[in-house]
Amino acid sequence: MDATPELLILTVNGEALSFPAGLTVAGLVTALALDIRKVAVELNREIVPRSTYAQVTLTSGDSLEIVHFIGGG
């Protein structure tokens, strides 16, 4: 029996990356060390409401665009 954990292959901002299976949008943002309060996420060309980040589970082949807002003046 193969004990290798299943991996997701996601395209994030045009780059193919692998992550553990069962990842949510919130988990991805955390894994990328981004501030969840300062990002907007598009999943397969649809905006993901911030209130659902913890409920939206990603699947292999998903394409995401993440925009990180940076304050300043």
Image (tube, rainbow, N blue to C red):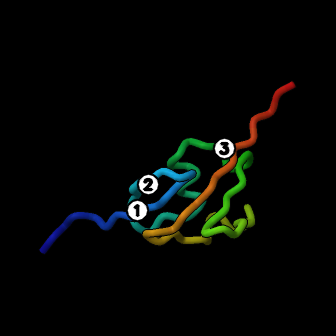
Q: CA gap, disc 3 to disc 1?
A: 22 Å
Give the amino acid type for the residue marked by disc 2 in the picture: Ala
Comes first in the chain, label 3 or label 1:
1
- Residue 49 location in percent, x, y? 74, 66
Q: Which residue is mark 2?
A: 16
At x 54%, y 64%, the residue is 63
At x 53%, y 54%, the residue is 12
The N terminus: image quadrant: bottom left
User: Looking at the image, do the residues carrying marks 1 and 2 touch, with CB atoms under 8 Å apart?
Assistant: yes
Quadrant of the image occupied by residue 21: bottom left
Is 35 situated left or right of 28 in this image? right
Q: CA gap, disc 1 to disc 2?
A: 7 Å
- Most foreground residue, 24 or 12: 12
Q: Which residue is mark 1?
A: 9
User: Looking at the image, do the residues carrying marks 3 and 2 touch, with CB atoms under 8 Å apart?
Assistant: no
Give the amino acid type for the residue marked by disc 1 in the picture: Ile
Element under disc 3: loop
Is 16 situated left or right of 70 in this image? left
Element under disc 2: strand
Which of discs 3 and 1 lies nearer the camera? The answer is: 1
User: Looking at the image, do the residues carrying marks 3 and 1 touch, with CB atoms under 8 Å apart?
Assistant: no
Q: Which residue is mark 3?
A: 35
- Residue 9 location in percent, x, y? 40, 62
Give the amino acid type for the residue marked by disc 3 in the picture: Asp
Comes first in the chain, label 1 or label 2:
1
